Amino acid sequence: MKHLRLFTALLVFSFAGVAVFATGAQDTSLNEAKRVLGTESSESSASKTKKATTTTTAKTDESAQVNSRYGFSNDDAVQALKAALNEGAKVASSQLSKEDAYYKNPLYYIDMPKDAEKLVATVSKLPNGKKNIENVILRLNRTAEACAAEIIPVFAEAITGMTVGDGVAIVTGKDNAATEYLKKKTYEQLVSLYKPKIAAALDQKLVGSMSANEAWEKLTATYNKAGGTANKVSSIFGKEAVKEVDVDLAQYATEKALDAVFLKIADEEAEIRDKPLEYSSDIIRKVFGSRK
């Protein structure tokens, strides 16, 4: 019995020793893990700092290379782009707002919408049909000319908000690179800003006693009414129905008016690139002048 109690005591003592040893080993492993993680964290932080420093240095080196190669920085290029586009907008506004700037210039002339080709053909056969069509065309062009006088603040807002990742690439690109960039980045915004002005102008009685919208509605109503009668006959003989004309005249006129504006801005951009020293803007002379 004594031997049994002694054996039990030894066994308990042994298990306690093992437990203490295991706990000690666990604490040691935990401490070691913390030490390793702490080291790795420090190394990771140092690595991130090193990468950030390297990136900043690379950007600085890249900027220095741009300055060394072209004589201006990317920031200079961006400012020159904005100045050039503002110059282009001013010229476009000044020239396109003159009477007949659209109407008598084949480059900018706004014709009837393509969707209205059948309408034009049909209405032209009616009494005073050709005159009514010409009235709509005249009003479309007069509307674009009237709105051209107001494009400067519209474009200024768009140009001010421009963010250019690589102005140097645009400055050193083709003759209309800046204009194309502006159109790509701001066209939808410009339409939303410009269209209300076009819509308001289309409602003005610019010539005679009728607005462009009134003249257009009169034409489409006449055509669609005639088409409705024709469709009744067509349905009897199983022929193709005449499609009604449903064109958003304000949207159409806005797009055509802006096409002309961008063409004019592109012309001015090409002029700036060709003769930069003739402009009063220091940044235009510095950036575009260095390309000569």
Image: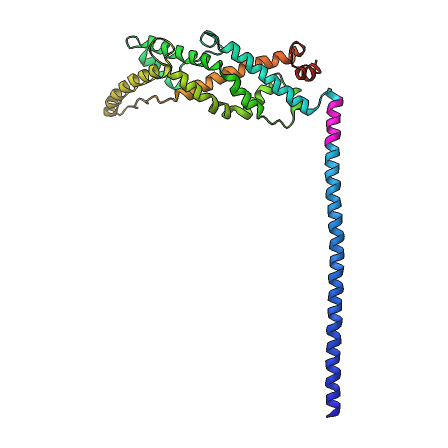
Residue depicted at 70% across the width and 16% down the height? 286
Query: Where, by quadrant of the figure, is residue 1 drawn?
Result: bottom right
Write the start and end of the magenta stretch as one range.
59-68
Give the quarter of the figure containing the C terminus: top right
Does residue 62 lie above or below 289 as drawn?
below
Q: Nearer the viewer, residue 34 or 184?
A: 34
Does residue 92 lie above or below 59 as drawn?
above
Q: Report the side of 272 relative to 25 (left or right).
A: left
Q: How many marks?
A: 0
Query: Where, by quadrant of the figure, is residue 233 drawn?
Result: top left
Q: Nearer the viewer, residue 4 or 192?
A: 192
Image x and y of residue 275, in percent? 65, 10
Image x and y of residue 72, in percent? 71, 21
Image x and y of residue 225, in percent? 27, 19
Image x and y of residue 272, in percent? 63, 13
Q: Report the side of 119 relative to 186 (left or right).
A: left
Q: Is residue 284 magenta?
A: no
Q: Is residue 63 magenta?
A: yes
**Would you say residue 113 is visible in this rendering?**
no
Q: Report the side of 196 relative to 15 (left or right).
A: left
**Would you say residue 116 is visible in this rendering?**
yes
Q: Main secondary structure of the magenta part?
A: helix
Residue depicted at 53% across the width and 25% down the height? 186
Q: Report the side of 113 relative to 282 (left or right).
A: left
Residue depicted at 32% across the width and 15% down the height? 219
Residue depicted at 62% across the width and 20% down the height? 81
